[in-house]
Amino acid sequence: MTHQRRLLVQLIQGADRHMDAVELWQQARVKDPTINRVTVYRTLNMLKGLGLVDELDLLHLEGGRHYYEARSTRDHIHLACLKCGRIQEFESSLFEKLKGQIERERRFRIQVVRVEAGGLCDTCQEKQTSLSS
Amino acid sequence: MTHQRRLLVQLIQGADRHMDAVELWQQARVKDPTINRVTVYRTLNMLKGLGLVDELDLLHLEGGRHYYEARSTRDHIHLACLKCGRIQEFESSLFEKLKGQIERERRFRIQVVRVEAGGLCDTCQEKQTSLSS
DNA sequence: GTACTTGCAAAGATTTTGCTTCCAA
DNA sequence: TTGGAAGCAAAATCTTTGCAAGTAC
């Protein structure tokens, strides 16, 4: 456990939004200006391999970047607004049931799941409605 | 509608597996050796913008490539075996219910959904079981 | 002390852009 | 004929690799 890794783990754990590797690197450089971009990639790959972080692409809203988040105890769904870019998270017991169905009907042992929905969030829908009226 | 586009659309429609841009380009070159890689990217972006193809990353099983598939009438779930790399598709009414729940509880108008699960397929689980016994 | 990690530079892989030429309608 | 599309080359992104030097334990 090096101080670089500690720093990166802290940043990911405490993040209030989804960051890609370069954003994470920029944040890390505030605390440790000598940290290298490569270290960020290597650490992310390690954490991903250990199952401690998830890699998302959030529907490729802005290019092919990959976003990272700390693996939480409960799986959740990402809702990405295609208009304003806001990302919401959603948990549901239906989602848990769906996973159970997959495991039973396909005898597939799920280790990681990712759900991403793109569309219009409530706020952006209201804006459209008021404009068209 | 150029012959290049016609060719690419035919290949995507008729594909029996998920291809990335380079694989699609290679297949296209069999029919039209002069077709350019850039044309493939541009056509894919256009089809994506029109909602005719979906862009997947299949959990980044092998690098950051993006895979493409023709948009079908019914949403489905991708099950990616982390061991053998096989991709299965899965449809479920529970999945449809889950989408309904999201739309109602968050007032989120879903335009595209992607579900990708990674784990062990039935075949790979059996192999592991027989080895450990 | 030693095995593992970092930083640096460079390469690799993937995708986009500028611009000219070509072609479908 | 003409506006959009394709081809080509080059650039821009994003990520990985090889290797020497450094560091946690």
Image (spheres, coloured by chain):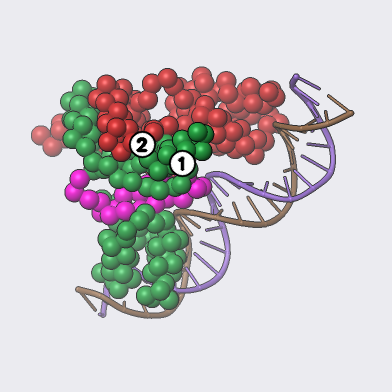
Chain colours: A red, B green, C brown, D purple
Chain letter, disc 2 residue:
A
Residues packed near mark 2 inside 10 Å, few (<14), some (14 to 19) or many (20 plus): many
Inspect the image, locate mark 1, and give the three-letter code of the amino acid beneath it: Lys
Q: Residue furthest front?
A: B133
Q: Which of B67 and A104 lies nearest the eye of the viewer?
A: A104
Whether residue A17 is visible? yes
Q: Position of residue B72 (x, y in %)?
A: 22, 50
Q: Position of residue B58 (x, y in %)?
A: 40, 44
Residues packed near mark 1 inside 10 Å, few (<14), some (14 to 19) or many (20 plus): few
Q: Position of residue A29 (x, y in %)?
A: 64, 29
Q: Residue furthest left?
A: A133
Q: Locate residue B131 relative to residue B48 in the image: left or right.
A: right
Give the residues in magenta: B52-74
Between the residue at mark 1 and the residue at mark 2, the CA separation in whole angstroms equals 13 Å
Residue at 37% of width from left, 75% of height from top?
B31
Quadrant where the C terminus of chain A lies?
Answer: top left
Residue at 68% of width from left, 31% of height from top?
A35
Residue at 30% of width from left, 45% of height from top?
B89
Inspect the image, locate mark 2, and give the three-letter code of the amino acid beneath it: Phe
Quadrant where the N terminus of chain A lies?
Answer: top right
Residue A98 in the magenta stretch? The answer is no
Q: Which mark is residue B127?
A: 1
Q: Secondary structure at mark 1?
A: helix
Chain letter, disc 1 residue:
B
Name the image quarter holding residue B96. top left
Residue for badge 2: A108
Q: Position of residue A105 (x, y in %)?
A: 27, 36
